[in-house]
């Protein structure tokens, strides 16, 4: 398995594969902002729309390939405000159903955390569907569960569900340096 950070051009080049991953993730029940059925044109367009943010450095996207196919992705969304450049949001950690249970989610998470620390980020945050398998991954990786927001988003089938907020400190906070 290989994990690589994408340029904007590379994101465009693998948008079809990323769309397949997104559709598989949504069809598998993950609440990542989309409803079923998610059409392929919409999924491809969503990924291609991210290219400008990648090009501008506001978004970093990594993909994991195994057995000559894309099996996972993760992103870091960097704020553009001067008072928040020490933090980033972990976004769209997805592993294809065929690639689950092999440590791929942990590998992608570790990749994003390491890249964030190398970029000077000292605080990461994320939200994930409450009571989802992802919560176990984040807890095992040392993330702190902050709390839960009721009726935050719908599941892919349209049912309201709570979300859990997590954060993780990477190194010393900016004020402690």
Image: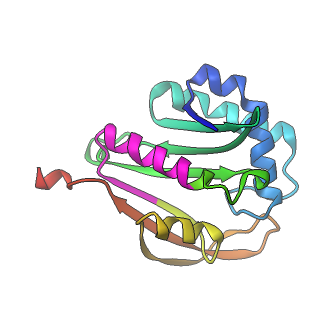
**Residue furthest to the top:** 9
Residue 41: percent from left, percent from top? 84, 36
Image spot of residue 118 (x, y percent): 32, 38
Vertical side of 139 occupied by 110: above or below: above
Magenta-colored stretch includes residue 146: no
Q: Toward the viewer: 61 or 49?
A: 61
In x, y percent, where is residue 157?
A: 82, 67
Q: Which residues are magenta?
A: 106-125
Answer above or below: position of 144 versus 172. below
Residue name at image x 76 percent, y 45 percent: 21
Q: Is residue 160 above or below residue 25?
A: below
- Name the residue at 33% across, 37% down: 119
Looking at the image, residue 52 sits to the left or right of residue 83; the answer is: right
The N terminus is located in which quarter?
top right
Dominant SS in magenta: helix
Which residue is at 58% across, 65% downward? 128
Residue 121 in view, yes or no = yes
Image location of residue 138, percent across then percent down? 50, 65
């Amino acid at each position: 398995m290989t994990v690589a950070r994408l340029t904007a051009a590379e994101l465009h080049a693998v948008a079809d594969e990323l769309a397949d991953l997104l559709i598989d993730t949504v069809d598998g029940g993950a609440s990542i902002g989309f409803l079923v059925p998610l059409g392929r044109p919409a999924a491809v367009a969503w990924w291609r729309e991210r290219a400008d943010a990648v090009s501008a450095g506001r978004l970093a996207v990594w993909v994991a390939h195994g057995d000559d196919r894309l099996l996972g992705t993760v992103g870091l969304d960097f704020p553009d405000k001067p008072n928040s450049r020490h933090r980033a949001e972990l976004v769209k950690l997805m592993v294809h159903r065929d690639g689950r249970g092999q440590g791929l989610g942990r590998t992608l998470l570790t990749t994003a955390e390491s890249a964030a620390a190398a970029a000077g980020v000292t605080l990461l945050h994320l939200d994930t569907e409450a009571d989802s398998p992802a919560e176990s991954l984040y807890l095992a990786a040392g993330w702190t569960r902050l709390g839960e927001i009721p009726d935050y988003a719908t599941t892919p089938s349209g049912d309201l569900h709570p979300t859990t907020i997590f954060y993780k400190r990477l190194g010393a906070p900016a004020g402690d340096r």
